[in-house]
Every structure is written in structure tokens, then in C-alpha cells.
Amino acid sequence: MPSKKEELLAQIDRAVKTCHGCRLWRTATHAVPGEGSFKAPIMFVGEGPGYHEDKLGRPFVGRAGSLLDRLLLRNEISREEVFITNVVKHRPPDNRAPMKDEARACLPFLIQQIKVINPKIIVTLGRSALEVFLKDKPIGEMHGQGFKLGNRVIFPLYHPAAALRSPAVLQILERDFRNLPKIMRGEILPKEIEIKSKDINQMKLI
Ligand code: URA
């Protein structure tokens, strides 16, 4: 019998699949709500589905996904034990970054997923995901470190797709990723970060 959490996640999936809250559903083939363990201690948040994700309705199954899989494997984290989702759940046309209003419209789904799964660590992949959790913070200064947000840790990383375009970024991503098991084990402590109380969305994510 599915657990309460599994039922809630299935409810979120259904709501995502019928969502017309922004323009993206019109050009998408499949919604991509996310997948993984309902007990995941780590949640990965990417930007939005790409071509292959849109075709299959699953997150990170294209080239960027293969790189993510490799990084997980190398750091002895199994894809089955984490949860993987995106800022927007329908593919932005031509793989453009999600617009602000699209990210805002989709945010309630991400908030619900976080509330149900209750991950200790949220790994943001790329700028769009970082912006949701830590507003106006440059990824160049934040990547590879853990930051406390309520009782969770936000761990910003460069997006795997950026690493596929640049060997220098790939090297940084590989190095940063090695900090993830250390953060999980408490060997690296997250840094305190100032959150302005007017960042209402951030407050909802805590
Ligand atoms: N890039 C993303 O940001 N998300 C995916 O699911 C795939 C590629």
C-alpha cells in the first residue's frame, strides 16, 4: 500500500500534469513533475525539462542527466535514493531559461514537494534554481558550499549542461560534487546566510 507521502506526491504529479498556470504547457509534450524517493534526504532542483525530458516525462534523462548520473555514482549516491525535479515542470521552448512569471507560477509545486519529502539538503543545479532559494546571489560565489535555510541546507552547483559546454566548469562541478557526501555526513558545516524577511517565497521554502 502506498504511504501517505507517496499518495501526496502522486497528487502533486496529477496537478502538475493538468496545470495551465503559465504558457509552457502549450508547447510541451509531457509534464515532468520529478521522480525519486519520497524519503529522499537530498533533493536536486534543475532549471526545467529539456528535449528528452519532455519526450519521456522524466527529469534529467538527456546528456545533462547522464552527467548527473555519473556524478552521483562516483560519489556513491544512488539516483533511487534522491529526488530530482525542476523549477518549472514543463519544457521552455528551445531550452530557454524559465521566465520569472513561469518560475513563480510553478513554485507552489516545488514547495509542496519539499514539504512532503522534507529533504535535509537541496542541491540547486544552475542559476534558475539558485535564484528560487537564495535570491540575488551569484552562482560564481555560492557554488560548492552549503548554506543554512531554516533547518535545511542549500547546496548550489553549476548546471550539468553548463559543464558539458565547458571543461573548466566540468572540473569545478566534479570538485564541488565531492563536498555533497561530506555535507551529508556533517563533515562540512553549512554557512549562515542572511534572508531578508521580505523574501516571502524563500520563507515558504524553509
Ligand atoms: N536540464 C534541467 O534543468 N532539467 C532537466 O530535467 C534536464 C535538463
Image: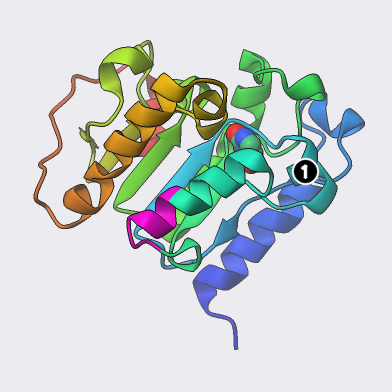
In depth, the one of 115 and 37 nearer the eye is 37
Residue drawn at x 49%, y 56% is: 83
- Image coordinates of residue 20 in percent, x first then y, are 82, 35
Q: Quadrant of residue 64?
A: top right
Residue type indicated by callout 1: His
Q: Quadrant of the N terminus?
A: bottom right
Q: Residues within 10 Å of mark 1 (few under 14, many from 20)?
A: some
> Across the whole image, how many numbered discs are drawn on residues?
1
Q: In this view of the protein, can residue 74 be seen by the observer?
A: yes
198 or 55: which is nearer to us? 55
Kindly identify the residue that appears in the image at 66 percent across and 17 percent down. 101
Give the extent of the magenta segment: 71-77
User: Which residue is disc 1 drawn over?
Assistant: 52
Q: Residue at x 84, y 46 (%)?
A: 55
Res. 63 image quadrant: top right
Residue 193 placed where, x, y %? Answer: 18, 23
**Residue 60 percent location from the top left of the image:** 62, 46
Residue 116 percent location from the top left of the image: 47, 58
Magenta region includes residue 73: yes
Q: Nearer the viewer, residue 96 or 133?
A: 96
Quadrant location of the C terminus in the rendered image: top left
- Camera-side residue: 74 or 80? 74
Task: Tell whether 37 sits left or right of 182.
Answer: right
Which residue lies most toward the bottom here? Answer: 1
Query: Measuring 9% from the left and 50% from the top, which residue is drawn there?
Result: 187
User: Where, by quadrant of the figure, is residue 147 drawn?
Assistant: top left
| For residue 76, side relative to residue 6 (left or right) | left
- Asked if the residue at label 1 sits under 8 Å from ligand 1, the reply is yes
Question: Residue placed farthest to the front in the image?
Answer: 167
Q: Is residue 138 above or below residue 81?
A: above
